[in-house]
Image (cartoon, grey):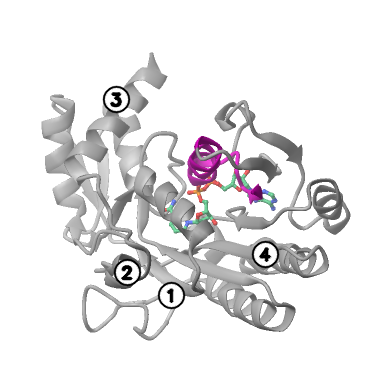
Amino acid sequence: MRVIVTGGAGFIGSWVCEAYISEGHEVLVVDNLSTGSEGNLPPEAEFIECDVRDSAGLEKAFRQFHPQIVNHHAAQINVRDSVEDPSLDAEININGSLNVLRLCAEYKTEKFIFSSTGGALYGEPEKLPAGESTPTLPLSPYGISKLSTENYIRYHSKNHGFGHVILRYANVYGERQNPEGEAGVIGIFCEKIISGKPCLIFGDGEQTRDYVHVSDVSRANLLAATLKEEGTFNIGTSIEISVNDIVRILEEVTKTEFTTINKKERPGEVRRISLDCSLAVEKFGWSAQVTLHEGLFRTWNWFSAKAG
Ligand code: NAD
């Protein structure tokens, strides 16, 4: 199949490209390189440098490649930046996505796969882990723009006859991760430990997240390409992990002594979240395989190698 991966030069997108290429699919990456880099691209992938807000540039990519699948990972990913500039977040995450959706309709794409968020969509759920039917109460413009895009995808899919799979990721971490992303704490701590600086913990460190390794996420994208059904699926581990847990595991994995400093809690951050992923298990046999210990080991080795 011919697959366009927007944001394919980024952390998760580049893993997704590798997964598709390893299964014999042809991949064209569309990315403006704002946070991604050409160095992340697998050599077999074609590449067009283009912003998803640039309709004409995007159309050129569709005209040239005629994708059967569009996998949309390009986004403004920083939750705090979305709070500072909700309009810019909406321009990229909503209007940019609408450009891609319009072209999917025009060029008769068969399927649209979207990287949504489970971590920033459900607010503070009463019951954890949160299933897909948990009320969506995003606490940030980033969560709002992802939720709006989900709704536009369902609308376009229904009215223009292409299939869709929406993957609501937990906090994705791993090799090549972007410290600005939702699982930024892991990348930031690795970099601090390497440079001998203290790791900052905002609040008491007992706030929890659900951390899923990027190799499990790329496998979910591969399965989504052949899934017969449409739907919206949480992609995580269902396990709540606190920042203090991350510190403890990093101490074991890095075998390095490092200090932590507790700072004032940051407003607007979710206290506890984990995702119920039983629907993905049931509908396409996906579940996370990489344990946090193993994933942190791989991630730490990657950051260490990068630092030389
Ligand atoms: P990333 O910053 O590494 O990847 C984003 C990519 O999109 C980059 O290559 C960037 O250059 C590109 N991009 C940004 N704006 C663009 C634009 N206007 N036009 C074209 N390309 C543009 O981040 P990531 O962590 O790999 O995130 C990928 C996707 O997964 C995003 O949609 C993000 O919202 C979603 N997601 C990530 C996480 C996480 O924990 N990392 C969790 C939930 C959802």
Which numbered disc flags the more N-terminal residue, 4 or 2? Answer: 4
Q: Element type at marker 4?
A: loop
In the displayed structure image, the side of residue 65 where residue 177 appears, left or right: left
Res. 29 mark: none
Q: Amino acid at mark 3?
A: Asn
Q: Tell me the residue at 72%/36% (across/down).
A: 47
Pointer 3: what residue? 301
Which numbered disc flags the more N-terminal residue, 3 or 1? Answer: 1
Location of residue 174 (image quadrant): top left
Q: Judge whether 277 appears above or below 174 on screen.
A: below
Pointer 1: what residue? 139
Q: Amino acid at mark 4?
A: Glu
Q: Amino acid at mark 2?
A: Val
**Residue farthest top in this picture:** 308
C-alpha gap between disc 1 and disc 4: 33 Å
Pointer 4: what residue? 110
Q: Tell me the residue at 43%/42% (across/down).
A: 179
Location of residue 256 (image quadrant): top left
C-alpha gap between disc 3 and disc 1: 34 Å
Please tell me how crowded label 3 is: few (under 14), some (14-19), or many (20+) other residues with Cα within 10 Å. Answer: some
